[in-house]
Amino acid sequence: MHPRRRPYGRHACARRDQPYRIDGFAHQRLCVIPRPQVEVALNRPGTRRLLVTDAGYFPSARGHRRVRANGATETIVLLCVGGRGVVEIGGATHQLTRSSAIAIPAGQAHSYESSSEDPWTIWWLHIRGSDAVELANGAMTSDSPITRLRSLDRVAALFDELVTTLEKRLSPAQLLLASGIAWNLLARIASDNTLPVEGSALERAMRYLEARVDGSIQVGELAALVGISQSHLSALFREATGGGPAAFHSSLRMTRARALLDTTALSIREVALAVGYTDPLYFSRHFRRHHEMSPSEYRSLRKG
């Protein structure tokens, strides 16, 4: 007689790519959306762009292993909250450890396996839809599919909310809600690729500029303050913000100017001085370049 196998979850169904371990993990959670329901949802507004097809939580998953020589139909995202394991994608091996996430593109040959000495605890999801690849790509850097998270607790909480949603009745409304949670989750992972690490040269430079919205500073001086070269600092800013240090500082000044125009009765000259412009005409020209309207025109707009 064959040993009795425990089911994988409330909505689970048999899959071709069964894990190495077949009896599940203590306190695991797992949701698999029936494939006919997936196909219907992929043709429905609200879920056609991003749909969670599978999601779960495997704690202390000793023996967890997947091998998909032909890849998966879905894009896969794994979040490690404890322990460690190895993920191989297209022949390249990556270590997945606590506070890191990895995205595996749909159709890409891959395998992953929990460490036997320090088995991982992971949250995971599979997604499909027209925007799934683009969103998952946002969670990867140009040289690695691994993202080191600074907001681990927030991302894990979103995974928890997602799985809890899918553990309920699988109505179109629940699938739509799950899609919204997944958008938020993937956006948080992607943002950790661009937000500067606390205490890094880039983060210190940004904080310095944020504290001096009403002043000015040369890029060379700023680079010297944070201890790196001017070219390196400019490259870091371009990668994180799309522009250099001067453009970042200018955006901070414009943000402050808009707030003053919206919430105070200060004159245009006074607003200009408050954000570091001694010449109100120059300020107005600069404001127009950013907003395609003058400060006075901006102030007269009806908002809210």
Image (tube, helix red, strand yellow):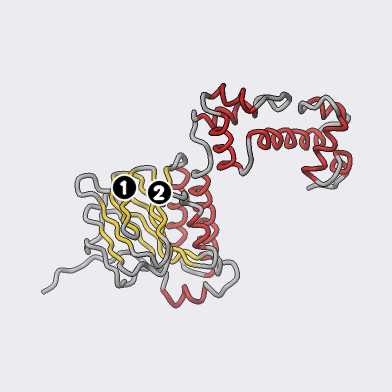
Image coords of residue 254 (percent x, y): 75, 36
Residue at x 54% of width, y 32% of height: 202
Q: Which residue is mark 1?
A: 95
Q: Which residue is mark 2?
A: 146
At 31% from the left and 58% from the top, the residue drawn is 91
Closer to the camera in the image, 199 or 185: 199
Residue 134: give x, y in percent of width and height: 52, 59
Q: Earlier in the sequence, mark 2 or mark 1?
A: 1
Q: Amino acid at mark 2?
A: Ile
- State the residue in front, 72 or 303: 72
The answer to the question of whether label 2 and label 1 lie on touching residues, with beta carbons closer than 8 A, is yes
| Label 1 environment density (alpha carbons within 10 Å; few <14, some 14–19, many ≥20) | few
Q: Is residue 95 above or below residue 53?
A: above
Which quadrant, please, contains the N terminus? bottom left
Q: Quadrant of residue 98?
A: top left
User: On the rendered structure, is 205 left or right of 286?
Assistant: left
Task: Judge left or right: residue 52 versus residue 270.
Answer: left
Task: Give the secondary structure at mark 1.
Answer: strand
